[in-house]
Amino acid sequence: MFEQLSLLSLASGGWGSALLAGALVTIALALACVPIGLPLGLAVALAARSKNRWARAWATSFSTVFRGLPELLTLLIIYYGCQIAAQKILGALGYPGEVAINTFVAAMIAFSLVFAAFSSEIWLAAFKTLPKGQYEAASALGLSRRTTFNQVLLPQLTRIALPGLSNNWLSLLKDTSLVSTISLVDLMRQTNLAVSVTKEPMLFYTVACLGYLLFSALSGQLFGFLERRFSRHQRSLQP
C-alpha cells in the first residue's frame, strides 16, 4: 500500500509532479476556451435572431455542425486539417518546410467552437424569457441599441443563462481528456503514461477521477457564487 502511494510522491521517482502539471494543462485549456467560446456563442445566438437570412443560415449551420459532430472528430479535423491546409497554402507560396500546429492551440480552437455551439442554444433560450416590453421601454428612454443590450439585457441574460452555461463548462472540462489523442500532455495523458510505466491502473485512474471530481466541485462553487451575485438585485426586490 505504501509502495503504491509512494508513486504519487512529488519527489524524484514519483508521478505527483507530472500529474499536477497535467492537471494545470487541463485547467488552462478549459479556461482558454471560455473567452473565445462564450462570446462566440452569444454572437451565434444574436445571428440566429437576426432579420438577415444569411446571418440566420450561418448561425443554424454553425450550431448544427459543431453540436452534431463528436468532439473527438472536431478535434482531429481541426488539428490535422489546419496543418494540411497551412502546408498547402505555404507550399503554393514557395515555402518548402514542414508546418506543425501547436497542439494546445488546436485543442483550444476545437473546443471553443464546440463550446460556442452549445452555449448559443443556452443564450437563445435566455433571450426567449426576456419580456419584449423591455426593448420598448429602453427605446422610450432614448437608450441606444448598444446601451440597451450592454446595460439592460446582457446582465439579465447572464443570470438566466448561468445554470445552462455551468453544465456546458462541466462538459468542456470532461472533453479536454480527449486531447491525449493528439499527444497534448494533460491530466489524462499523464495518467495513461503513469499506468503504462507502473502497471498500476486502479491507483492512477482513481487519482484522475478524484482530480476531475475536484474540478467539478470547485466549478459548482464558483457558478453558485456567480448565480447569487447576478441575482442579488432580484432578491432585494422580493418582499
Image (spheres, rainbow, N blue to C red):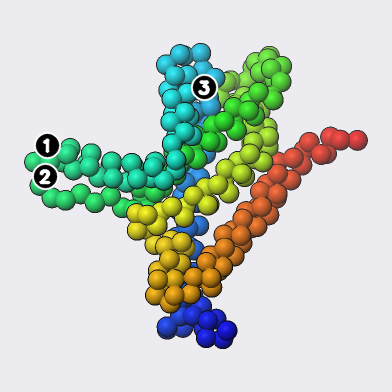
- The residue identified by callout 2 is 95
Residue placed most toward the observer, 25 or 142: 25
Question: Which numbered disc, 1 or 3, marks the residue that appears first in the sequence?
Answer: 3
- 189 with respect to 212 (left or right): left
Q: Which of the 4 image quadrants contains residue 66?
A: top left
Residue 48: horizontal and vertical position, in percent? 51, 22
Q: Kindly state the secondary structure of the residue where label 2 is placed.
A: loop
Q: Amino acid at mark 1?
A: Ala
Q: Is residue 228 left or right of residue 218?
A: right
Q: Residue at x 44, y 75 (%)?
A: 199
Q: Check if mark 3's residue and mark 2's residue have beta carbons within 8 Å.
A: no
Amino acid on which the number 2 mark rests in the picture: Tyr
Q: Earlier in the sequence, mark 3 or mark 2?
A: 3
Q: Secondary structure beneath disc 1?
A: helix
- Tell me the number on the disc at residue 146: none
* Residue drawn where x is 67% and y is 41% of the image: 163
Viewport quadrant of the N terminus = bottom right
Q: How far apart are the two marked residues, 2 and 1, measured between alpha carbons? A: 7 Å
**143 or 67: nearer the viewer:** 67
Other residues around mark 2 within 10 Å, as few (<14) / some (14–19) / many (≥20): few
Coordinates of residue 166 in the picture (x, y in percent)? 62, 45
Report whether residue 155 is seen: no
Q: Residue at x 53, y 81 (%)?
A: 4
Q: CA distance from mark 1 to mark 3?
A: 37 Å
- Residue 111 higher or lower than 239, as above or below: below
* Mark 3, residue position: 48
Residue at image mark 1: 92
Instruction: Give the mark count.
Output: 3
Circle 3 residues within 10 Å: few <14, some 14–19, many ≥20: many
Q: Quadrant of the C terminus?
A: top right
